[in-house]
Image: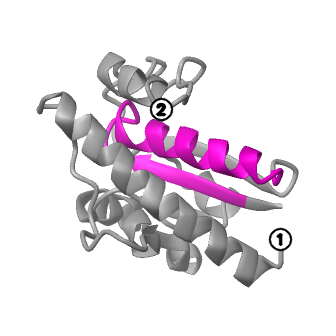
């Protein structure tokens, strides 16, 4: 089983959306039994809260369901549990590097490293922007999700 954790700041916009996008792709490919997916935030601003309503609405328009997700904070134990800890931006990556046991820092990567079409390495936080920001984030996450799944298939023979 390959385990993937998506991480953003508060776990209410980008990372739960990434979780839903990747979960949908994995399910469509009938790989649910081979890949475990979760999301978390670097900060405890929204613990236990559902994803942002704007993120949920944008995701729903693409057939993705975020309703069952609840915000949680990333922990040092996540580094032992997950094979991939994928950050939405460099600030998240920095905070996780401070949390990571030294032997597990190799698990940290920017999610957009797996993108095939986008040139940006960071997924912008749409929280303070308008609806177009959530759509742009979805486009970016869908691109990176395809690349990540291909990478997992190749590296893990899944």
- Which stretch did the figure color magenta? 3-31
Asked if residue 152 lies left or right of residue 90, the reply is right
Residue identifier under label 2: 62
Residue count near mark 1 (Cα–Cα under 10 Å), binned few <14, some 14–19, many ≥20: some
Q: Between disc 2 and disc 1, whose residue precedes?
A: 2
**Residue 11 lies in the magenta-colored region:** yes
The answer to which quarter of the image holds residue 9 is top left
Q: Residue furthest right?
A: 33
| Residue at 61% in and 43% down | 38
- In the depicted view, which residue is nearer to us: 42 or 153? 153
Task: Classify the position of the C terminus by image quarter.
Answer: bottom right
Q: Secondary structure at mark 2?
A: loop
Find residue 128 and report its horizontal and vertical position in percent.
Answer: 12, 31
On screen, residue 33 versus residue 96, left or right, reads: right
Residue drawn at point x = 26 percent, y = 46 percent:
136
Q: Position of residue 2 (x, y in %)?
A: 76, 63
Could one spot residue 42 in this view of the protein? Answer: no
Q: Is residue 82 visible?
A: yes
Residue annotated with mark 1: 158
Q: Residue at x 13, y 29 (%)?
A: 130
> Badge 2: how crowded within 10 Å, few (<14), some, or many (20+)?
few
Examine the image and state in which quarter residue 89 appears: bottom left
Relative horizontal placement of residue 2, taking residue 59 as reference (left or right): right
How many marks can you see?
2
Which residue is at the front of the view, 74 or 155?
155
Q: Position of residue 27 (x, y in %)?
A: 75, 45
Position in image of residue 114 (x %, y %): 47, 72
Q: Residue furthest left?
A: 129
Report the front residue among 16 and 107.
16
Instruction: Name above or below for residue 48 compared with residue 4.
Output: above
* Residue at 46% in and 53% down: 142
| In this view, the mark in front (2 or 1) | 2
């Amino acid at each position: 089983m390959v385990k993937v954790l998506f991480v953003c700041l508060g776990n209410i916009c980008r990372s739960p959306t990434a979780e839903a996008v990747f979960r949908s792709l994995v399910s469509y490919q009938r790989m649910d039994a081979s890949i475990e997916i979760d999301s978390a935030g670097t900060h405890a601003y929204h613990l236990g809260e559902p994803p942002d309503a704007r993120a949920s609405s944008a995701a729903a328009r693409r057939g993705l369901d975020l309703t069952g997700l609840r915000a949680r904070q990333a922990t040092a134990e996540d580094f032992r549990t997950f094979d991939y800890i994928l950050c939405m931006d460099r600030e998240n990556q920095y905070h996780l590097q401070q949390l990571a046991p030294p032997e597990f820092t190799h698990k940290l990567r920017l999610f957009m490293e797996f993108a095939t079409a986008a040139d940006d390495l960071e997924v912008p936080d749409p929280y303070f922007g308008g609806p177009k920001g959530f759509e742009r984030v979805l486009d970016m996450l869908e691109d990176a999700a395809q690349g990540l799944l291909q990478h997992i298939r190749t590296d893990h023979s899944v």
